[in-house]
Amino acid sequence: MKQILFKAAVLALIPSAATFAAIPAGKPNLRPKVMEILNLPPENRSQAVLTTTEDMYKEFISVAFAEDQSMRLRWRALMLAAEGRREKATPDLLKAGAHKQWFMRNAALVALAEVNQGEAQKLAKKLLKDKALVVRSAAVDVLQKNPRPEVRDLLWEEMNQKYNYRNKESLWIRAQIVDAMAQTPADHELKIFNRLLNDKDTRVQAAAVGGMEKLTGVKLGDNNSTREKLVLLWKDYARKEKLAL
């Protein structure tokens, strides 16, 4: 299985494997081979996990749910468990998806997206309203891979949720949602993208340009046009063409 990639936002919180110190002694008491795999650099871990036995899998899961272990180690252990058992890891990943700690829910969603897309979609719908922003963002990433009409409706609804604002300021997930929707926009969404050109968040405005371009087939500006310039050009175009808001 290809190495599981972390979201950029999570990477900022979880340093690369090169910065990890050796795993400290303590509970759970791991056998030498499991400890060795957990300490390998990322390019070697995926190869080593191909020989995962049922006992090793159980130990990875034990580490993942061990409250006395670090966030980084627990994340890594859950990922290795998923890599080693693929779809068979689903029950434990779903359990992690309901965990009280945000990074476990996030890790579960990232792992499920690699080994069981169907269950990942179901979990993502739940976590779209998670209290942790990075978890909600991961849910958007998963859902955009299968943008059925009902999923698109869910994502559009999230644009106006209070928890996607902080002190009345738009959070970056709103622009992420618009960008995701602009990849394969539906015809009836033209008025939505047009309206979002006037959103107070300039990131949302810029993402809306992508939807306008796809739906109209029109390309305004050039390669040197700034994001702000493109938004102004599209506002002017929409006004002249009398596009509905």
Image: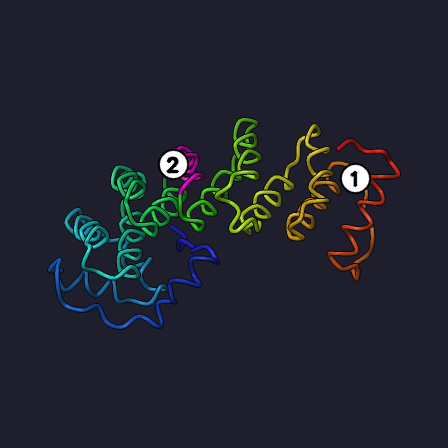
Q: Position of residue 6 (x, y in %)?
A: 42, 56
Q: Check disc 2 and report the residue beneath it.
A: 123
Give the quadrant of residue 69: bottom left
What secondary structure is found at the residue carrying circle 1? Answer: loop
Q: Main secondary structure of the magenta part?
A: helix
**The magenta stretch spans which residues?**
116-130
Graded by Cα atoms within 10 Å as few (under 14), some (14 to 19) or many (20 or more), the crowding at tag 2 reads many
Mark 1 or mark 2, which is nearer to you? 2
Give the numbered dot on residue 167: none
239 sits to left or right of 109: right
Q: Amino acid at mark 2?
A: Leu
113 sits to left or right of 82: right
46 or 30, which is in the foreground? 30
176 or 112, which is in the foreground? 176
The quadrant of the picture occupied by the C terminus is top right
Depicted 125 relative to depicted 80: above or below: above
What secondary structure is found at the residue carrying circle 2? Answer: helix
Q: Check disc 1 and report the residue beneath it.
A: 217
Q: Amino acid at mark 1?
A: Gly
Q: Spatial distance from mark 1 to mark 2, Cα to Cα?
A: 35 Å
139 sits to left or right of 209: left
234 or 87, which is in the foreground? 234
Residue lying farthest to the right in this orientation: 240
Q: Residue at x 30, y 40 (%)?
A: 98
Q: Position of residue 214 (x, y in %)?
A: 73, 40
